[in-house]
Amino acid sequence: MGKMLSEGVTLVEMMVTLATIGVVLSIGVPAVKDLFATNRMSAATNDLVTTLHVARNEAVKGAEQVVICASTRWNDAEPDCTLDTLVDGWIVFVDINRNGARDAGDELILAHGPLAADITLTSPATFVLFSSTGRPSIGQSDIPDIDFLLCDGRGNTSTGGVTAGRLVTMTRTGRPQVIAKGNRVDCPG
C-alpha cells in the first residue's frame, strides 16, 4: 500500500470554510455590538439611579437640602452647576443656604462625568432638589413624577423582551424605579 500525501486544501474546502466564517461573523458581530450597547445603557441607568439614591439618603441623613445639578465642570477642584444637561455630567452637594447653587461651604458629595457619547438623557430639569424628608423637587410642585429617559441609537427596539431605552421615574417619595418595558419608554428612532 502506498502512502497518500496531503499537499493542502482544495478550492472547495477553502470556499466552504470562508462561507462558514462569513455566516458566523454576520450573526456574531451584530449580537456583540448589541451586547456592548446594552451594557452601556445599563451602566448609565445604574449610575443615575445610584446618584438619586445617594442624594436622597444624604438629604434624610443630614436633615439638609441636597441638590443634583448638571455640571460640565464636574472634574474641577471646586465644581459648580452649569446650564447644560445631565448627560454632560453632574454633581451632588449639600445646599446649606438652600439657594440651589453650590457655594463656598456646600459639601460636595459626588461628581459624575458625561454619559457614553451615544446615550441621551432627557429630563424635565437640569437639577433635582431633595428636601430633608427625602422628597424630590424640580422647582414645580404640580409634577407627580420626575422622569429621566435614557436612549441610544437603537430607539425602542426590543432587546431580550425589554426596550433598548430606559425610563427612570421618581415618585413624590423620592424612590427611583427603572422601567424597561411598556409604552412609557418612548425613545425616538
Image (cartoon, helix red, strand yellow):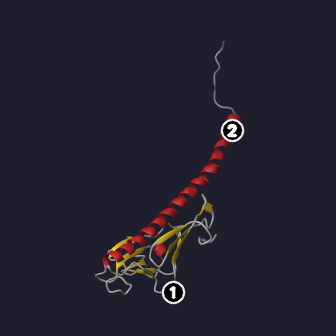
Residue 74 visible in image: no
Residue 131 visible in image: yes
Q: Where is residue 49 in the image (x, y as percent from the top left)?
A: 45, 69
Q: Position of residue 68 (x, y in %)?
A: 41, 77
Q: How many labels does the image show?
A: 2
- Toward the top, the furthest residue is 1
Give the quadrant of residue 54: bottom left
Which one is earlier in the sequence, the residue at label 2 or at label 1?
2
Image quadrant holding the N terminus, namely top right
In the displayed structure, does residue 113 sit left or right of residue 23? Answer: left
Give the quadrant of residue 161: bottom right
In the displayed structure, does residue 7 sit left or right of residue 172? Answer: right
> Residue type at mark 1?
Asp
Image quadrant holding the C terminus, namely bottom right
Residue depicted at 46% across the width and 65% down the height? 46
Residue depicted at 63% across the width and 29% down the height? 8
Image disc number at residue 37: none
Specify few, some or many for label 1: CA neighbours under 10 Å numbering under 14, 14-19, or 20 or more.
few
- Eyeballing the image, is 178 above or below 95? above
Q: Name the secondary structure under disc 2.
A: helix
> Residue type at mark 2?
Val
Residue depicted at 44% across the width and 76% down the height? 174
Give the quadrant of residue 18: top right
Q: Name the secondary structure under disc 1.
A: loop
Most foreground residue, 91 or 96: 96
Label 1, on which residue?
142
Q: Where is residue 157 in the image (x, y as percent from the top left)?
A: 63, 64
Label 2, on which residue?
16
Specify few, some or many for label 2: CA neighbours under 10 Å numbering under 14, 14-19, or 20 or more.
few
Cα distance between the residues tagged 2 and 1: 66 Å
In the displayed structure, does residue 147 sit left or right of residue 9? Answer: left
